[in-house]
Amino acid sequence: MPKTITIPSAGELALNTGEVLCKLPSEALHNQLHQLTESSKIARENLEATELAARFLCAIELDHQKKVQHVSPWKEWVSSNCDFSYKTATNYARLLKAGRSGAIVNLYPELIPDKAPSLMSQDELRDAGNTLANALQGLGGIRQLYLQLDIISLPGGKKDNSTPPAPPTESDDIEAIFFAPLQKIGKLFTGKKHLKLDPPKARELEAILQSYVDDLKRIK
């Protein structure tokens, strides 16, 4: 069943931490504080999902306006009609493109409406917003999503557009594949962890290790 995401009105987000703490009982304060962190976490995640859903709807509306306004250059229309910068509008366009291409985890392209918000009824807009918010739950805020999609980069850093090196194959790194696990097993024996095994399990492990030793002896 989909969750309903409601955007709080002005003033409802203010959390008077001092007032909340004063209301907590003196006993089991740690439990009350933990519950406060959990409820705050849920509230933050819901707001982040609402934020992302609203940005997607804004991107869809901008895409619609770009098609119907026939203004060239588009930058002038944005400058005259938007409360945000052309750079922000460009980021919205890239966000929408990433969503429609299936590049965002858990956001299936078919969940992104083709209909512009300005052409939707109130019920359609509410349903579209809630569907997007539910799909975007847990992805974090817009900055985190932009970084994941390479829409923005870290301050002072450059995006890495190079092709990442291929992971080593077994033929390239066969010794590491075998010796890395053996080092972990060696630490267990050095730490006397094997002494905690029951005798039947110790004999079973002994037989397994011996069979591998016999196989290795065949290599000449």
Image: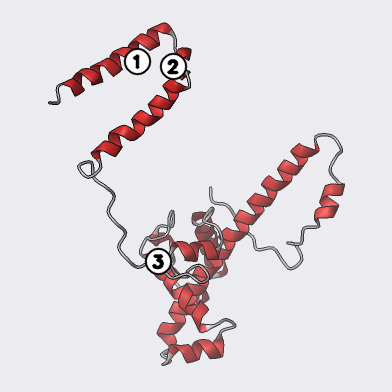
Mark 3: few/some/many CA within 10 Å (<14, 14-19, 20+)? some
Q: Which mark is residue 98?
A: 3
Residue designated by label 2: 194
Colouring of the image: secondary structure
Looking at the picture, how far across and down is residue 44, in whole percent?
64, 56
Residue at 44 percent of width and 53 percent of height: 106
Q: Is residue 58 left or right of residue 173?
A: right
Amino acid tagged 1: Leu
Please report the residue visible at 47 percent of the width from the left and 74 percent of the height from the top: 91
Looking at the rendered structure, the secondary structure element under dot 2 is: helix
Are the residues at dot 2 and dot 1 in contact (C-beta closer than 8 Å)? yes
Relative to residue 55, is residue 23 drawn left or right?
right
Question: At which x and y percent is residue 34?
Answer: 72, 42
Mark 2 residue type: His
Q: Which mark is residue 55?
A: none
Residue tagged 1: 205
Q: Is residue 25 above or below residue 157?
A: above
Sequence-first tag of 2 and 1? 2
> Furthest residue to the left?
220
Find residue 194 and report its image quarter.
top left
In the rendered view, does 216 fall on the left or right side of 129?
left
Q: Amino acid at mark 3?
A: Ala
Give the Cα distance between marks 2 and 3.
51 Å
**Which quadrant would residue 184 be assigned to in this image?**
top left
The mark that comes first in sequence, 1 or 3, is 3
Quadrant occupied by the C terminus: top left
Q: In the rendered structure, are the residues bearing label 1 and label 3 in contact, judged by CB atoms less than 8 Å apart?
A: no
Residue 113 percent coordinates (x, y): 44, 66
Q: Quadrant of residue 198?
A: top left
